Amino acid sequence: MNTIHLHQLLPQVFAERTDIRSDIWNRDITLQRGKLYLVEAQSGTGKTSLCSYLYGQRSDYQGQITFDDTDIRTLTPSRWDHLRQHSLAILFQEMRLFPELTALENVQIKNRLTHFKTQEQIEEMFCRLHIHDKLNTPAAIMSLGQQQRVALIRAFCQPFHFLLADEPISHLDEDNAQLMAQLILSEARAQSAALILTSIGKHPNLPYDNHLRL
């Protein structure tokens, strides 16, 4: 997948509003593989909704989203499964880890489906993000910042053309945020992938190609 095109996209909940000033809503824009996009927004302007639309979790929008030349409303469940295994990776704002599983088990549960990373590569990412000592710690007793880093590693256990990252450093201090930024950039570059990163103010320091306001 090389392009995502948004044609006059607008959440249905905003349909009656006439005061929307956005670089995304009610616009025609194309997101290209290999580019880094920062989407900045105020709370309540549809940031997480945008990620949900692109990941196929919600369809309560007006307008059209196409992957390459295909309207995503026409995609079958099996096609979505394929896209989520090979083209679309996501870091959810709420992480969605299994609390009873350890940090490593949360990552392995995905990697056993994809076989994309070796155990050595997974542990290297834990080291790079300074949570190698948390490998066998249940997610339920990890800090939110630690959970955020585990969720990122899990997102990288698959091939992808586009990575959706919804407020990926909201619980991190500056030093750990920079470590995460470096890993995001290296993984995206390794796959010639695009990054679509959302923020309500705090975002990684990356060489963004486009800065969009929601």
Image (cartoon, rainbow, N blue to C red):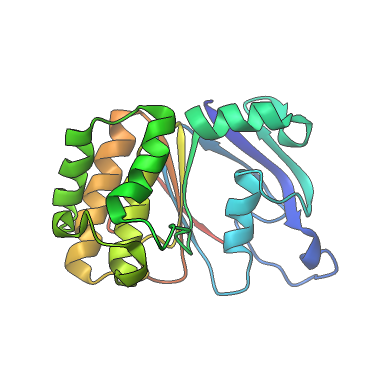
Q: Is residue 117 above or below residue 97?
A: above
The quarter of the image holding the C terminus is bottom right
Residue 87's spot in the image, x, y percent?
A: 50, 30
Which residue in the rendered view is the most extreme toward the right?
Answer: 16
The residue at 30%/46% (across/down) is 184
Q: Give the total number of marks visible in the rendering.
A: 0
147 to the left or right of 96: left
Q: Is residue 3 above or below residue 146?
A: above
Residue 135's spot in the image, x, y percent?
A: 21, 54
Residue 206's spot in the image, x, y percent?
A: 29, 52
Question: In the rendered image, is residue 209 in sight?
Answer: yes
Location of residue 68 by image quarter: top right
Q: Is residue 66 above or below residue 203?
A: above
The residue at 47%/62% (across/down) is 93
138 to the left or right of 195: left
84 to the left or right of 105: right
Residue 146's spot in the image, x, y percent?
A: 28, 64
Q: 77 and 201: which one is in front?
A: 77
Which residue in the rendered view is the most extreme toward the front?
Answer: 100
The quarter of the image holding the N terminus is top right
